[in-house]
Image (tube, grey):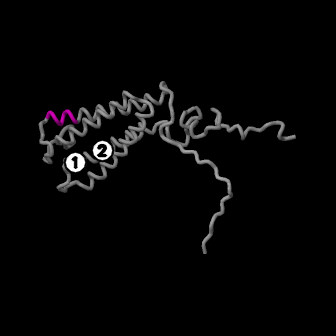
Amino acid sequence: MATHVLHSGTKRPRRRVTLNEHLPVDHRLSTIYRVGAGLMGLVLIAFGILGLIDKVGFFDTGGDTVAGLNTNGALSVLSICVGLILLAGMVIGGNFASTLNMVLGCAFILSGFVNLALLDTSFNFLAFRIQNVLFSFVVGVLLMIFGMYGRVGSALPHDNPYWRARHPGADRSGAHPSAAHHPEQGR
C-alpha cells in the first residue's frame, strides 16, 4: 500500500543559501580566515622548501624525511603550490579565504584517505607513510575549522552576517517582525 502526500497548489519559492554571501570587508571573521590560510600556507611552503633542499628524486619513494614526514620532489612541489594558493587566499581574505580553507580542508582529508589506501603499493608516488596520512588529516581538519569558523553552527550570534543571511526577515535580536505581538490584535 502506497501513501502519497498531497501538496496544496501553492508553491513556496525556494530560497537558496550559498556559501559566498557578502561580508563587509572589515568584518572581524575575515581575520580568522586569513590567519588560518596564512599559517597553513607557511607550514606547507616550509615543508616543501625543506624537501627540495634535500635534493631527493622527484618520484623517489625511498625513506627521505623532512620534519618527521616522508617526502620526495613531487610532494615538495605540490606542498609549495598548495601553500602559495593558501597565501593568495590570505591576501584576498574574506569569503574567498573561508571557502578556500573549506575546499582545501576537504581535499586534504580526501588525500589522507586516498593515500592511506595507497600505502605499500606501487601507486604511492608521493612517498606517503602513515605519518603523512595523519598530517594530511590534521591539516585538513584545521583548514576546515578555520574556514567554517563563524559560518556554521547552531549558536551563531544574531549580528553574524551568515545568521542574518539565513534569516532575512529577523532583526538583530532574532525576532521575526511577524512574530511580534501587536496590541491592536488582542482587541
Using the rendered view, name the quadrant where residue 75 is placed: top left
Question: Residue at position x 68%, y 38% from top?
Answer: 176
Task: Identify which residue, 120 or 178, lies in the foreground.
Answer: 178
Q: Secondary structure at mark 1?
A: loop
Q: Nearer the viewer, residue 43 or 73?
A: 73
Residue type (three-letter) at the residue carrying disc 1: Phe
Q: Position of residue 84 (x, y in %)?
A: 29, 32
Q: Is residue 65 left or right of residue 44?
A: left
Q: Residue at the far front: name it.
A: 9
Residue at x-position 17% and y-position 40%: 73
Residue 136 got which mark?
Answer: 2
Residue 138: percent from the left, percent from the top?
Answer: 33, 43
Cβ–Cβ under 8 Å for marks 1 and 2:
yes
Q: Which residues are magenta?
A: 48-53
Residue marked by disc 1: 128
Q: Main secondary structure of the magenta part?
A: helix
**Residue at mark 1 to residue at mark 2: CA–CA distance:** 10 Å
Q: Residue furthest right?
A: 187
> In which quadrant will I find the N terminus?
bottom right
Counting residues from the start of the chain, the first of labels 1 and 2 encountered is 1
Could you tell me which residue is drawn at 65 percent across and 37 percent down? 170
Q: Is residue 102 magenta?
A: no
